[in-house]
Amino acid sequence: MSILRADAGVQSVFGSPARVFDAESEEPLFPYALLERHETTPGGASLVKGLEHRITLACYSRDDGLKGAKQCLSALRTAVDQADWAVPGAHVVLAQVLYADAMRTADRRAFRGVVRVRIISEEGA
């Protein structure tokens, strides 16, 4: 989450400090993003231990309708694509956005965006 919070593009959409949460806030200001799911499975190859991470981020916007939700998604996508995924004791082989979509929430007052990210890491420096 700190990688996303530190990104200038994310801060331009979600404020500074960026409102990108992992359940720290029960009623955040709009727009904001949440880590909804982080699934980890073995993903090594060629006798190298590795992990595959599937991360689901959601963002919520009440400003500018669908356009505002797409701005939130764009900021998150760009941050994922440009991040330096340095992880102690691991080498990140791949980090990519698999899916992004925006839809109106059931209360029709906000838009919800979803970004699914896949990260593959291997043991090593």
Image: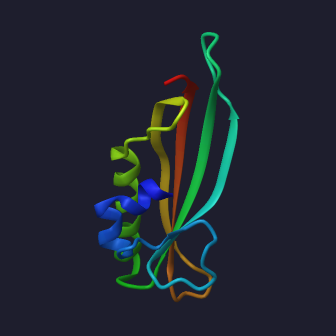
Q: Nearer the viewer, residue 46 or 123?
A: 123
Up-down: is 61 above or below 18? Answer: below
Q: Residue at x 35, y 74 (%)?
A: 16
Q: Nearer the viewer, residue 97 or 125?
A: 125
Q: How many marks?
A: 0
Up-down: is 90 above or below 17? Answer: above
> Residue 40, located in which quarter of the rendered image?
top right
Q: Residue at x 39, y 54 (%)?
A: 77
Q: Is residue 92 left or right of residue 17?
A: right
Up-down: is 111 above or below 91? Answer: below
Q: Position of residue 80 (x, y in %)?
A: 41, 49
Give the color scheme: rainbow, by chain, secondary structure or one colour: rainbow
Q: Residue at x 34, y 69 (%)?
A: 11
Q: Position of residue 101 (x, y in %)?
A: 48, 61
> Residue 64, located in which quarter of the rendered image?
bottom left
Q: Position of residue 85 (x, y in %)?
A: 44, 41
Q: Position of residue 111 (x, y in %)?
A: 49, 77
Q: Nearer the viewer, residue 69 or 43?
A: 43
Up-down: is 42 above or below 64? Answer: above
